Image (tube, coloured by chain):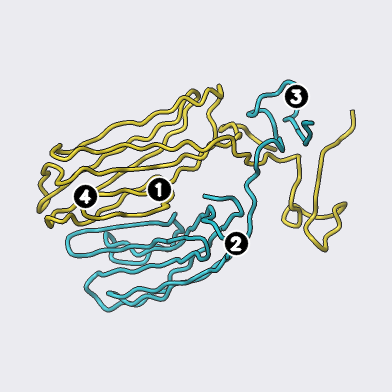
Chain colours: A cyan, B yellow
């Protein structure tokens, strides 16, 4: 027997509305947040740093990571939060802020090489979902 | 007709008074419902200078859906680069011949289809050269039942 819950948008009949006019239809899996959080990477020019967030789901989950990065074009830290992975490359300078995710861990990492000696702390936040990638 | 729907508070919160951030589910707001995962696989051809193209899939929804795309992996003859990476994705990697391989993939959601526009280019000291290897690429688009452009209160 078919069962579940459907909720339509205002002005739409729940009996006839297409998926785009429904707020909820339990026929379909809904994106579910397992964990979210913040952290930071402490990096000196030429080096790298990483953080590991264990989820132990046994499968590769969907994740979104946003954070600060080093821009090789400005030669400085960008305080805005951008989506990881993020890469910049110019001449002999590189910047990479990225992540890997497997069936047990999310690893967020960053590094840059600008040929200087600066040190910076890069904040990030992440969303980790129950939903399989 | 009165107000109706479904609301579930977080553990320890009163569902009658919980704020939105204390609420796990509230049917007054749209949820992201996964309709389909569509995988795309294609190859950028060895010997081509600046290969590019568009991969397309007709979803048949009749509206522009919210999508999340991932680069699952890309592989050359010598190296495998596993994902997943959230799209859009731009990356540069060295080739086995010492040149630079650039990959760019941009996802688009449209009323009738979803598309992936891609370029695979190789450069030697800044000058474009033919691709050293075939580059096999796989991406997956997650299509959600959320009509882009819908304005909530």
The quarter of the picture where residue A114 lies is: bottom left
Tell me whether the residue at label 3 lies in contact with that at label 1, contact meaning CB atoms closer than 8 angstroms: no
Q: Say yes or no: labels 2 and 3 on the same chain.
A: yes
Give the x, y percent position of residue B46: 16, 40
- Mark number displayed over residue B40: none
- Mark number displayed over residue B77: 4
Q: Chain of mark 1?
A: B
User: Residue at the right extreme?
Assistant: B2
The quarter of the picture where residue A93 lies is: bottom left
Rendered-image quadrant of the C terminus of chain B = top right
Mark toward the viewer: 2 or 3: 2
Q: CA distance from mark 4 to mark 1?
A: 17 Å
Dot placed on the residue nearer the N-terminal end, 4 or 1: 1
Mark toward the viewer: 4 or 3: 4
Q: CA distance from mark 3 to mark 1?
A: 40 Å
Q: Residue at x 36, y 48 (%)?
A: B89
Comparing B142 with B14, the one in front is B142
- Mark number displayed over residue B72: 1
Q: Left or right? Give the position of A14 relative to A94.
A: right
Dot placed on the residue nearer the N-terminal end, 2 or 3: 3
Tell me whether the residue at label 2 lies in contact with that at label 3, contact meaning CB atoms closer than 8 angstroms: no
Q: Left or right? Give the position of B101 relative to A42.
A: left
| Residue designated by label 2 | A36
């Amino acid at each position: 027997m078919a069962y579940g819950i459907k909720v339509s948008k205002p002005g739409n009949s729940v009996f006839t509305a297409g998926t785009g006019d429904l707020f909820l239809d339990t026929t379909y899996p809904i994106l579910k947040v397992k964990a979210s959080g913040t952290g930071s990477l402490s990096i000196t020019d030429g080096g790298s740093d990483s953080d590991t967030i264990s989820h132990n789901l046994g499968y590769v989950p969907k994740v979104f990571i946003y954070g600060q990065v080093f821009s090789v074009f400005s030669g400085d830290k960008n305080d805005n939060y951008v989506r990881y992975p993020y890469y910049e490359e110019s001449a002999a300078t590189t910047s990479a802020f990225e992540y890997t995710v497997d069936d047990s861990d999310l690893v967020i990492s960053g590094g840059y090489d600008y040929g200087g000696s600066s040190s910076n702390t890069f904040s990030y936040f992440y969303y980790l979902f129950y939903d399989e990638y | 007709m009165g107000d109706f729907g479904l609301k579930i508070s977080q553990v320890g919160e009163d569902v009658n008074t919980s704020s939105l951030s204390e609420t796990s589910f509230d049917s007054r707001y749209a949820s992201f419902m996964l309709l389909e995962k569509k995988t795309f696989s294609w190859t950028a051809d060895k010997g081509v200078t600046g290969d590019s193209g568009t991969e397309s899939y007709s979803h048949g929804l009749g509206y522009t859906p919210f999508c999340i795309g991932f680069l699952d992996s890309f592989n050359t003859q010598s190296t495998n680069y596993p994902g997943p990476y959230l799209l859009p994705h731009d990356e540069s990697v060295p080739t086995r011949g010492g040149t630079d391989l650039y990959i760019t993939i941009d996802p688009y959601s449209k009323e009738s289809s979803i598309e992936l526009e891609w370029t695979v280019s190789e450069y030697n000291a800044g000058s474009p050269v033919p691709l050293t290897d075939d580059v096999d690429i796989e991406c997956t688009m997650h299509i959600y039942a959320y009509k882009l452009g819908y304005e909530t209160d």
